[in-house]
Amino acid sequence: MTNKKIKYQPVPPEITELVSEHGNNPEALLEVLVDLQAHPAGLSPATVTDAARALNVPPHKAYGMATFYSMLSFEERKKVLRVCDGPVCWLKRASDKSPISSFQAQLGDDYTVERSSCLGLCDRAPAVLVEDEQAGPVTSADAQKVCEGWRGVPTDYSQPRPGEVRVMMANADKIDPDSIESALEYGAYQGLKSALRMTPEEALDRVEVSGLQGRGGAGFPVGRKWKFVAGAKGSPKYMICNADESEPLIFKDRVLIDTNPHQLLEGMAIGGYACGASEAWIYIRGEYEYQAQRLERAIEQAEAKNLLGENILASGFSFKIHVHRGAGAYICGEETALIESMEGKRGEPRLRPPYPPSYGFRGKPTAVNNVESYAAVPHILKNGVDWWKTLSNYSTPGTKMYMLLGHVNNPGLFEAPFGLTLRQIIEDFGGGMLDGSEFQFALCGGAAGTVVDGSMLEIPIDFASSQKGVSLGAGAFLVCDQNVSPVVFLRELLHFFAVESCGKCTPCRVGTWRSLEILKRMAEGKGQQGDLSELKALSDNMCFASFCGLGQSVPIPMNSAMKHFAKEFEKAAH
């Protein structure tokens, strides 16, 4: 026993002031740490402890947050340039074996150069993040221009490709994304006005009858999820937009925000009305600072027009939308990890059930949908269910955003109905393979999708086609020619999963790194007897024993690659 009392020094006033700017809210811990890193005091064990004291949270919790997110660092740094090493940028940098070293040599001591997982700039690959500014295509040879403010050339999506059916991208060449007057001129918020003339139940029924499936990858019916939230016990209810978009190959949500942010806000407001929610958050990845600011401007403009905020259009319905920034963590794309992050915790998944529609943000009923899902809703309310279903002759109604990358003549993004085959995607929308390139394989759906060979080019693709071996996922396709080794490519995918595993469960934490170690050896021609057996065992273990979808989905590209390119893997394992 001791009678000693611990006396703490007062929290420095600059940290007290910083915390007060975030309402002294413990849920804002991540945002406080991000701001603290930009503060002259910087991030250190001492300043993180002071921030924790100011927020009245345990210092170990704040320290755990500061060491979890990749955009936070205790190291003293000047300007930071993050070099993307996602699979698309890796393909584009085939001749640059050490891009980080090359950039550092060119930039000297003015910048701290570090790797980053996929930046969501796959259509601008190879990409970098200069402080908060997105840049690409950028190679190390462009380093000096980057220092002078050059940021590459953004991809232009103003004109549709032949065969496109545009709904969410219909006004991409017309609307000024930073002007609500421009958006209103082209029909913005007409869907919300239509919804407000209905009862919430009628609006919800319209979304459900439309057959709209969630566009984040799983394809769960949006209307059904919203019904769960509307009927769940407990209040208040919340709407969340998942704009984390951290998976390699996927950048559609960024394009939707950049071309027409108001259709996202409108879709969220309709969802709030239908579900009985009055408050919402857009959780956007930290690497999308430009898009986060665009959304904040759009929210301010919509509130000024009484299209968001209190008593919208004198309807009695109030709806407030906030923007919440992440700080670099792929796992936060998993909805429960996202919610944990919003609550001021490490972005680690929750055990399910309970699911967010019954127990989500702050323990209340919560609907989590991605940007594309919300962006489709206003058009359904404005034009009707019958119109939505006439957009496609395929069994799945409506349109989908597709991302096509790799060795094709016309990579990028387009909008079209469901049911396209991979051959149609490559030839009709991608302009065919590059000269001298022959199709060898494609990664379908995203990093956690299936690796397919030429035998699967004719399968119509939708949310159920994964059962036939071709994933739709979020709608991304990376096409690789005969010069890309499937073994080396799988190594790159496992590198992404290994560094992005949150580490909460052993099967994923150990399984991804061990698989990466084996694939590194195989790619270098140092394979050993038993490597393939161990990879398959690791795959099974991750699939059946991982805590969340990250570890459970890693085996999808592993198993499909080893199945379709068995000879290549067997050769590399000996």
Image: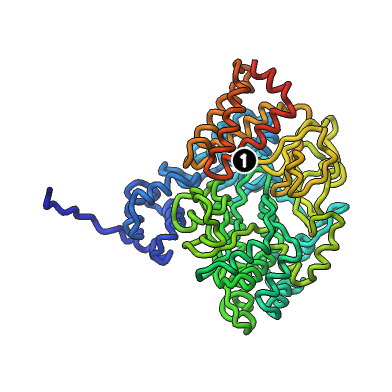
User: Residue 375, percent across and down?
Assistant: 70, 62
Q: Decide: is 259 above or below 272.
A: above
Q: How has the structure been colored for display?
A: rainbow
User: Which residue was labeled with disc 1?
Assistant: 553
**x and y percent of residue 206 in the render?**
73, 70
Let me know if residue 358 appears in the view: yes
Q: Is residue 108 left or right of residue 120?
A: left
Q: Is residue 564 above or below residue 166?
A: above
How many marks are shown on the rendered structure?
Answer: 1
Quadrant of the image containing the C terminus: top right
Q: Which residue sits at x=12%, y=49%?
A: 2
User: At which x and y percent is residue 334?
Assistant: 57, 50
For the question of whether residue 137 can be seen, the reply is no
Secondary-structure class at tag 1: helix
Q: Nearer the viewer, residue 571 or 549?
A: 549
Residue farthest to the bottom?
A: 314
- Foreground: 66 or 95? 66
Image coordinates for residue 21, horizontal then vertical, percent: 42, 65
Residue positioned 59% across, 46% down in the render: 129
The residue under label 1 is which amino acid type?
Ser
**Neighbour class for label 1 at 10 Å: few (<14), some, many (≥20)?**
some
The answer to whether 393 is drawn above or below residue 455 in the figure is: below
| Left-right relation of 197 to 22 | right
Q: Nearer the viewer, residue 77 or 532?
A: 532
Which residue: 83% across, 36% down?
433
